[in-house]
Image (tube, coloured by chain):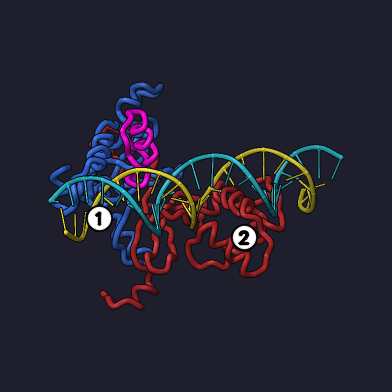
Chain colours: A red, B blue, C yellow, D cyan
Amino acid sequence: MQRALERAGSRVTGPRRTVAALINDRAAHFTAADLLDDARARRLSLGRATVFRTLELFSEMGLLERLDLPSGEHVYVVCAPRHHHHVICSRCGRTAEVADLGLEDVLAEAATRTGYQIDDHRLELHGLCPACRRRTGDPS
Amino acid sequence: MQRALERAGSRVTGPRRTVAALINDRAAHFTAADLLDDARARRLSLGRATVFRTLELFSEMGLLERLDLPSGEHVYVVCAPRHHHHVICSRCGRTAEVADLGLEDVLAEAATRTGYQIDDHRLELHGLCPACRRRTGDPS
DNA sequence: GTAGATGCAAAACCTTTGCATTTTG
DNA sequence: CAAAATGCAAAGGTTTTGCATCTAC
């Protein structure tokens, strides 16, 4: 992460390290408020504005991505900077990334049918992660 | 819409008719605030809370769907109650619906690769609608 | 007549901004 | 040392809630 900041020409500061550390300790997706709470719980000084600014920075750098859950919540997930999609566990919030799913055909089909020129897309998959699946009734 | 309300066991009230009318007069996606502004502009009495409550009601009834744009804006679009996806014009906000795009294979592939049990998905397509395409430089 | 709907104003949120102060490179 | 980053508190915006008053059925 230090590397990434340097590469991006941004400064490596205490607060940014703190945010990075807090993110690292989170298993699943999180909100800005989550990090603020974590910081307070650990008695780490960290300003609200800094958290928002840092999340935005990390997102621009491609280290994070913001997802909008069906609930309307804005959550962030750690991810690789290439194009991909997220599979989100609706129970625990853990996410996995998938890429190259063969969406091209789907997009082409949509373009043909609607006449729209499709420039971008967002795909979110919701379900249960392997662990939550085991803990649930249905081991199908 | 009257029908839909009756079917759902909800009352057909003045404010709900007003909201439905305002929605009808909108060409593209809109926010709760948009409707409030429209109402004010037309000197229609309509409470803020009622707008939010009605949008929620219509959404539950499947007449509307709330989308979260990449910008973070919460917009609503009119749509049919079956499963489908939205193609959204990034210039004018007009939307089109598409269904049965052959996503099944994509979902199956994602499930296989991640081990998640995939229960639901959201796909948003962004681009230019035919009209905006024409008005833009690139008639490719 | 009564459950359901409304409107208002306040509360609750969430996110951004201005600006003086501190810190990094 | 200069530019960048921070923190605070305030502003801005959106959505929700409590409650007294209406109104559709």
Residue, disc 1 = B104
Q: Nearer the viewer, residue A17 or D24?
A: D24
| Residue B49 appears in the figure | yes
Q: What residue type is labelled 1?
A: Glu
Q: Which residue is drawn at 33% across and 42% down?
A: B76
- Residue type highlighted by circle 2: Ala
- Relative to B16, does residue B122 appear above or below in the rendering? below
Write the start and end of the magenta stretch as one range: B29-51
Residue A47, image x, y percentages: 65, 55
Would you call the spot at circle 1 few (<14 residues within 10 Å), some (14-19), or many (20 or more)? few
**Residue indicated by mark 2:** A20
Q: Could you tell me which residue is drawn at 24 percent across and 39 percent down?
A: B20
Observer-nearest of B48 and A7: B48
Quadrant in which the C terminus of chain B appears: top left
Task: Give the CA distance from mark 2 to mark 1.
Answer: 37 Å
Instruction: For mark 2, name the chain.
Output: A
**Badge 2 local density, few (<14 within 10 Å), some, or many (20+)?**
some
Q: Main secondary structure of the magenta part?
A: helix
